């Protein structure tokens, strides 16, 4: 088996490409993508063969390119991208386990009635249906923070790391989501 180097002799280093990409150079982003995409897709396939490796890689690169300013050591791009990929896979697997527990198949819309006991009063069924509709109306960042906390069970620090936000910002988004849901469902947060 022949192992190919990630960087060809004479090619710009990851560190140099990251610095150029931070300045908006899309060619540098493309070079980083080409250099690492096969490795990231392979990693995704090995860690979660049931996931689409192309989708995982695309999400990982989008997250990485959107957060390049947070990378303190530009030459560590490869390892940092690997950490992002692992984090994304962990989140996808957690979500898959949750959906499996609920008996939902991939690609199905969530039927709120299926999540409520058949013995539940109609009032409870209506509240659950309203809650699901309300959650879908939240701004994406608020919805994500709330669901990471309430459904995924992540701590505030973990949510902040996953969303690349401060803990204070995560708290504000969760509180805003709770208030918005309270207005729609007519409950107190």
Image: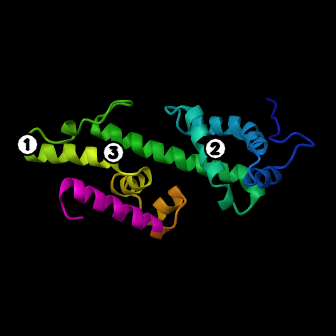
Residue visible at 44% across and 54% down?
A: 141
Residue visible at 80% across and 35% down?
A: 3
Residue identified by numbered label 1: 122
Q: Provide residue 19's location: percent of width, then percent of height.
A: 78, 55
Q: Quadrant of the C terminus?
A: bottom left
Q: Provide residue 21's location: percent of width, then percent of height.
A: 75, 50
Rounded to the nearest angstrom, the CA distance separating label 3 from label 2 is 26 Å
- Relative to residue 180, is residue 16 drawn left or right? right
What segment carries the magenta color? 169-189
Q: Is residue 174 above or below residue 96?
A: below
- Relative to residue 6, is residue 143 drawn left or right? left
Residue visible at 41% across and 58% down?
A: 154
Q: Nearer the viewer, mark 3 or mark 2?
A: 3
Any part of residue 120 in sight: no
Q: Earlier in the sequence, mark 3 or mark 2?
A: 2
Q: Secondary structure at mark 1?
A: helix
Q: Earlier in the sequence, mark 1 or mark 2?
A: 2
Rounded to the nearest angstrom, the CA distance separating label 1 from label 3 is 22 Å
Figure quadrant of residue 102: top left
Residue identified by numbered label 3: 136
Residue identified by numbered label 2: 61
Residue nearer the viewer, 84 or 43: 84
Q: Secondary structure at mark 2?
A: helix
Q: Is residue 183 magenta?
A: yes
Any part of residue 19 in sight: yes
């Amino acid at each position: 088996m022949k192992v190919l180097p990630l960087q060809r002799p004479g090619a710009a280093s990851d560190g140099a490409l990251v610095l150029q990409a931070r300045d908006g150079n899309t060619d540098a982003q493309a070079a980083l993508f080409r250099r690492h995409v096969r490795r990231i897709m392979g990693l995704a396939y090995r860690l979660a063969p049931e996931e689409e490796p192309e989708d995982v890689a695309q999400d990982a690169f989008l997250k990485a390119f959107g957060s390049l300013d947070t990378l303190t050591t530009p030459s560590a791009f490869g390892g940092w991208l690997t950490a992002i990929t692992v984090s994304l896979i962990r989140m996808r697997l957690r979500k898959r386990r949750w959906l499996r527990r609920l008996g939902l198949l991939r690609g199905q819309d969530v039927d709120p009635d299926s999540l409520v006991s058949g013995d539940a009063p109609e009032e409870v069924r209506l509240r659950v249906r309203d809650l699901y509709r309300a959650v879908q109306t939240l701004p994406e960042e608020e919805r994500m923070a709330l669901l990471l906390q309430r459904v995924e069970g992540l701590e505030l620090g973990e949510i902040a790391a996953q969303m690349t936000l401060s803990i204070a910002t995560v708290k504000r988004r969760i509180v805003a989501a709770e208030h918005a849901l309270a207005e729609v469902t007519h409950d107190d947060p």
